[in-house]
Amino acid sequence: MVLEQPGKPLALRDLPKPKPAKGQLLVRVSACAVCRTDLHIVDGELPQPKLPLILGHQIVGRVEEIGDRMNPQFKVGDRIGVPWLGWTDGDCAYCRSSRENLCDNAKFTGYTIDGGYAEFTVADARFCFHLPEKYNDVEIAPLLCAGMLGYRSYRKCGDAHRIGIYGFGNAAHLITQVAVYQKKKIYAFTRPGDKAGQESAHSLGAVWAGGSDETPPEELDAAIIFAPVGALVPAALRTLAKGGVVVCGGIHMSDIPSFPYVDLWQERMITSVANLTRRDGEEFLELARQISLKTQTETFALEEAESALKKFRDGKLNGTAVLTIDSF
């Protein structure tokens, strides 16, 4: 399913099977989860995507072919996951200081390189992951972005014990389970009046759930904002204890309105999260092996990708949309 221009529907196209170069894997795709970032790309909110483009960066599949024939990490038939960060140069100042997520020349799966809305894709073997066998292909697909990038946002909270989460979607569902497992207290903020979302948060172990316009019963040590709504930043700041941090966990957000300096004073902080590192992915998948994370999914055939995106945009999904791909 190909994006030919932002703002236009995806088109079903027959393309040649890609060939893996040295260091790459040819992957037979079995599932690819749909992400809000895909919507941002389709809607033209993220600049300069590769065009035409095959979207998709939460890819589950099996190694079909290894570009240089020998790879100590993978063999033909291995089930692997392919995430958002698809390539880095390994040589810039960021890569050399363990900040490869900020690489000057990074390439991103389903954005600047072709992704997983297809029967086959190629991926740099350095940025692929072995996956826990306890999850099937559909269950584990959302862990490759909502989980991994959510985990990076969670890591940015440091040793915070009382954590607020704004925007209780896919990433929040997964990170709440991790936080509760680690004995943290989660305060869930949903759209005002979203009782179903609040009940869902409680069922996962949140100690409090309410609307984003409400004040939690105690001050928080940190807040993560997954919703792409800039107005939530000053709202989250006002919930923090001294020294607390607001983590903006999305790749795109509407403008942040002005707010009085007193809301930031006393060493409160605002930080964003950009992409992920391989360390984030490895740590999160190790937790996933321990915890038995529950994912909520709704499946679509590959040719129904446009329908999945529309339901996502309209807020009508019952979980993460996952494209299931049958290769012939």
Image: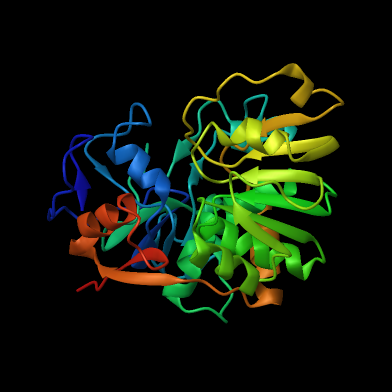
Tell which of 156 and 121 is nearer to you: 156
Image position, residue 78 (x, y; %): 48, 73
Asked whether residue 286 appears in the rendered view, the answer is no
Residue 230 visible somewhere in the drawing: yes
At horizontal 30% and vertical 34% (from top left) the residue drawn is 50
179 to the left or right of 55: right
Across and down, in percent, residue 134 comes to: 57, 82
Quarter of the image where one finds residue 47: top left
Q: Quadrant of residue 306?
A: bottom left
In the foreground, 221 or 251: 221
In the displayed structure image, the side of residue 204 where residue 70 appears, left or right: left
| Picture residue at 64% right of the left edge, 65% below the top | 285
Does residue 323 sit above or below 254 in this rendering?
below
Q: Position of residue 146 (x, y in %)?
A: 53, 56
Left or right, residue 82 beside residue 49 = right
Q: Residue at 25% x, 53% y: name it.
A: 310
Q: Nearer the viewer, residue 292 or 238?
A: 238
